Amino acid sequence: MKKTFLFLLVLACSFSSCEKDDICDASTITTPRLVISFYDFNNPSELKSVTDLTIIGEGMTEGVTYSSSTLVNGSTVSIPLKTDADATSYSFILNYGNSDATVVNQDELKFNYSRQNIFVSRACGFKTEFTLDPTTAFVHTDAAVADAKWIEYIAVKESSITNENETHLEIYF
């Protein structure tokens, strides 16, 4: 009886030191990216696919990777914003890597925003939500080598970036 009691006491003490695993579930919404949809400038209601677009962040040498490729061929893209600064700059290079240098065109976009850190859980930590600046959400310039901007017009569709389920910015070209 004494051994059974001692065994149960040791067993109870060993379980008291266990705690819930802190694993962030993959389905938990974390810091959202900026969702950009591309449209035909001449037919604004039609989505338009970009061809061999690469998006390179300021100070980076490689483009943002999508499905193990730095080239985007589609009508929608999501890019991360800096969580430790109120602005993020990217080079949007159309027809990147084309052997005919005359069709490669680079535009610069700087996104201005405010940030809010929100506690998700102990396992996941914090996420950052962004709000594009209402007066100057972006600054659009041509590359250092001026070759005419390929982006004709940019419209802010949703200035509050809290999820990736909606388009935040529309680019017409």
Image (cartoon, rainbow, N blue to C red):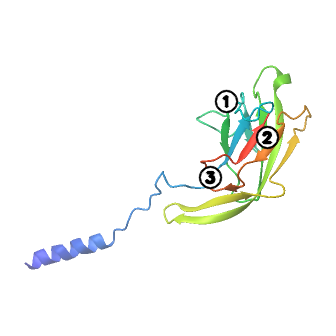
Q: Quadrant of residue 115?
A: bottom right
Q: Quadrant of residue 16?
A: bottom left
| Callouts 1 and 3 close, C-beta under 8 Å | no
Q: Earlier in the sequence, mark 1 or mark 3?
A: 3
Give the residue drawn at x 62%, y 37%. 66
| Percent x, y of residue 139 | 85, 49
Q: Nearer the viewer, mark 2 or mark 1?
A: 1
Residue under circle 3? 32
Residue under circle 2? 91
Image position of 27 (left or right of 66): left
Task: Work out whether 87 lies above or below 46.
Answer: below
Between 139 and 58, the residue placed more toward the observer is 139
How crowded is the residue under tag 2: few (<14 C-alpha within 10 Å), some, or many (20+)? Answer: many
Between 48 and 81, the residue placed more toward the observer is 48
Callout 3 amino acid: Pro
Residue under circle 1? 73
| Percent x, y of residue 141 | 88, 42
Callout 1 amino acid: Asn
| Percent x, y of residue 94 | 77, 31
